[in-house]
């Protein structure tokens, strides 16, 4: 061997050793998925198709993906993997059994925003813009499992609701004076959420808690508007003070980079250029709704919740 070639080989040898030092010998034995499993990923049991495990973006929704979702729905072993994905991503907002909390109830046969499998898969992957429903970083192939489990929640028994809806309606209109702050089928004051379909969107437990402890259930997002209605996504409570010294407080109606509009508790609407404000406070976690814990007796509270649960659209109370 020529002396010059021998010198080159000797010079490269340390580099080869360094490169080998960066290879995990356990990864070679356990296969390409070992590093991810070592991290304790709770969704490791969900099979992944070819492609990146994370950060690969939403998968295209097609007939094959929908068929796969429905196959999982009818296979208890596969559906258990969808449950694991749900527990990993969804219970914080939708509850352990999809009963609803800050997020809407999923344990119902028909979901207002996900009437088709395609709609559901779209929401699972991309979320709902301008709401608190985010897009979720899923493994490739995981969306079908998660969507299948959400569909399975609709087959659970309906949560029993004590109380008399007819008596609850009377309390809603009289003692509660709910229409002074809420709308129902286009009537009332839009200071709080519209209640026309509240029985489809919220669980009895959530509704009861919202009545007796309103501040506990105020959404925590600053997002200005709801993508579907253009109304406030979360009825965020705003306190503003102009440079001229005028104080105004109410729920946000709209907001952009330069201006903000709010509705006070009398229904009056104010619009301000942000440059004209000396103070602007967004009170996340605060609700203008009164606490009704001492207003209604336990039986009256049952009746009112039963009525709210019955509000499911144009056929309210039918």
Image (spheres, helix red, strand yellow):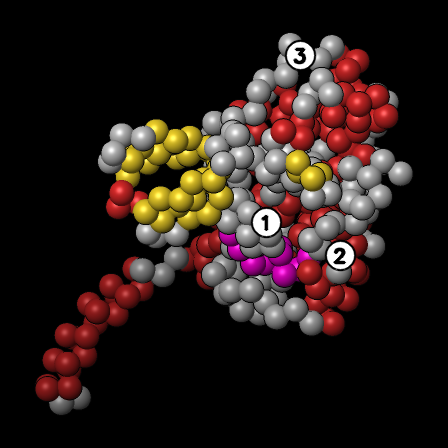
x%, y% of residue 95? 65, 35
Residue 295's disc is 3
Q: Is residue 124 magenta?
A: yes
Mark 3 or 2, closer to the camera: 3
- Residue under the image location 80 percent in, 26 percent down: 169
Q: Is residue 154 above or below residue 296?
A: below
* Residue ID for mark 1: 43
Does dot 1 land on a helix, a strand or a loop? Answer: loop
Could you say which is closer to the camera, residue 238 or residue 150? 238
247 lies left or right of 118: left
Q: Which residues are magenta?
A: 120-134
Image quadrant in which you'd find residue 3: bottom left
Residue extending farthest to the right is 318
**Image point 12% across, 80% down: which residue?**
7
- Structural distance between the alpha carbons of marks 3 and 2: 38 Å
Query: Which residue in the protein does label 2 denote?
Result: 115
């Amino acid at each position: 061997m020529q002396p010059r070639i021998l010198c080159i080989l000797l010079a490269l040898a340390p580099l080869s050793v360094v490169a080998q030092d960066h290879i995990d010998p356990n990864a070679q034995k356990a296969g390409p998925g070992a590093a991810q499993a070592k991290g304790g990923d709770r969704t490791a049991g969900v099979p992944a198709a070819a492609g990146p495990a994370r950060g690969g973006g939403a998968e295209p929704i097609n007939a094959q993906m929908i068929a796969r979702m429905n196959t999982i729905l009818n296979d208890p072993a596969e559906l258990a993997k969808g449950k694991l994905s749900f527990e990993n991503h969804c219970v914080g907002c939708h509850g352990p059994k999809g009963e609803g909390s800050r997020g809407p109830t999923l344990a119902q046969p028909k979901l207002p925003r996900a009437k088709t499998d395609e709609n559901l898969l779209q929401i699972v992957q991309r979320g709902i813009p301008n709401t608190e429903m985010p897009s979720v970083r899923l493994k490739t192939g995981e969306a079908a499992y998660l969507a299948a489990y959400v569909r399975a929640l609709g087959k659970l028994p309906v949560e029993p609701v004590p109380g008399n809806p007819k008596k609850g309606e009377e309390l809603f209109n009289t003692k509660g004076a709910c229409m002074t702050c809420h709308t129902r089928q286009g009537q009332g004051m839009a200071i709080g959420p519209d209640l026309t379909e509240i029985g489809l969107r919220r669980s009895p437990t959530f509704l009861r808690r919202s009545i007796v402890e309103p501040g506990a259930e105020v959404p925590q997002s600053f997002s200005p508007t709801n993508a579907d209605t253009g109304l406030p996504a979360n009825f965020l409570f705003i306190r503003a003070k102009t440079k001229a010294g005028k104080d105004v407080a109410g729920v946000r109606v709209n907001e952009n980079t330069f201006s903000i509009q709010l509705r006070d508790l009398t229904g009056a609407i104010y619009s301000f250029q942000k440059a004209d404000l000396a103070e602007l406070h967004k009170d996340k976690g605060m609700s203008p709704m009164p606490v009704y814990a001492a207003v209604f007796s336990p039986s009256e509270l049952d009746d009112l919740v039963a009525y709210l649960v019955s509000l499911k659209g144009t056929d309210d109370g039918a």
